[in-house]
Image (cartoon, rainbow, N blue to C red):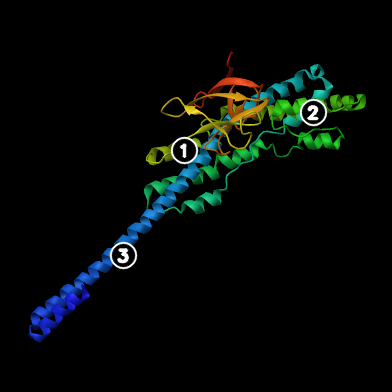
Amino acid sequence: MIRFFRQIRQRLLTENKLSKYLLYVIVEVFIVILGILIAIQIDSWNEQRINRERYEFGIKQLYRKLKARDLTWDLYQDRASFHLSIIDSLLDFPDLIPPERLAGNLLVLDEFLNDDWMDENWFLAYLDFNPTDSIQFGVAQHLHRYFRGRYPDFKNWADLNGFESFKAVLIRENIPICEFSASGLRATIDECAKMPLDQNTSKKLRTLLETDAIVLKLQTLKKRRQEIFEITPTPEKTVLEFIEANFGHLDLSFHHLEIFGSASLHGYGLGVPMKPANAARTLWLLKTTLEDGFVKFRTDENWTFEWGGGEANPDILIFKGPRIPVRKGTYEIVVDLEKKSYEITPVLK
């Protein structure tokens, strides 16, 4: 190509056609400039495409993280219900509680928040917002309100700052305590009840429940747990709705659901895949054999989205809830993520 243009230029010079030569030079310069401009534009398009793909990948990660936080409110409400039943018993009927279960009842009241709090700086830096893009600017505004608003307020409020933890009180009083069980708050109370408790320690626990400090904390905790049910919508809801409305072309659904745990085929490693029973992938089915042990459910082979049973009601499906105990046998299993329910039904031989 270069040789072809050089021959044209040389012929025009030898034929002394200056005007045509100048026209040729102008055309050649124009073609070169046009080629440069096209290359710059293509490079710009590629850069925009890469930035858009990177941003949308960040949006999907943000959505999943916020969705997990939003679903965690089911866990908070479930724990709040369980805590309220304990608090009412400790305040109104302490003498009806067996002494070996008193320490466990107090201990589980410290366990409430999920520690998986989000890092604002990570998301703001990772998404790399373009202030001239109205949608990206809208995402930034919603995130700013989220991180500056009810999100940190709730964390500080739920931590019950200003009060000593029940665990610290029990340790200070030399009352034996147990470790939290992976099977949940009920299981923790059962484990604590197995610890030896002499008569003096039992009396000390009864006396402790009557102190002004403990009564005040229980009353304050009761009020805080009741207020959990008044928080609607969740702090994450407005951000999620904005993303769903403006990024509908992205695949934000769950692709897989599996059962895993000590009772399943591969334990806590590989899960056993369930089959979707509707187009929305909210209803899942499985027939499988289980061993004596525990099971939970999770999506897409990771721990970001996993469900167990409830504390207040073990028969309902709770996000991040405790393990579900099962006995050896063959079962028909149904999980409904929309209705937040599950069924593990034995198959009769």
The secondary element bearing badge 1 is classed as: helix
> In the drawing, does residue 126 fall left or right of residue 153?
left
Q: Decide which of 22, 128 is in the foreground and name it.
A: 22
Estimate the spatial distance between the alpha carbons at disc 3 and disc 2, rounded to whole Å: 70 Å
**Tag 3 or tag 1, which sits nearer the N-term?**
3
User: Where is residue 206 shown, x and y percent of the image?
Assistant: 85, 24
Residues packed near mark 2 inside 10 Å, few (<14), some (14 to 19) or many (20 plus): many
Determine the residue located farthest toward the front in the rendered image.
Answer: 349
Residue type at mark 1 is Leu
User: Element at badge 2?
Assistant: helix
Badge 3 crowding class, 10 Å Cα cut-off, few under 14, some 14 to 19, many 20 or more, is few
Q: As drawn, is 275 to the left or to the right of 204?
A: left
Q: Which residue is mark 2?
A: 192
Residue at the disc numbered 3:
40
Question: Of residues 110 and 47, which is closer to you in this image?
Answer: 47
The Cα–Cα distance between marks 1 and 3, rounded to whole angstroms, is 37 Å
> Which residue is found at the position 31% from the left and 65% from the top?
40
User: Which residue in the protein does label 1 denote?
Assistant: 240
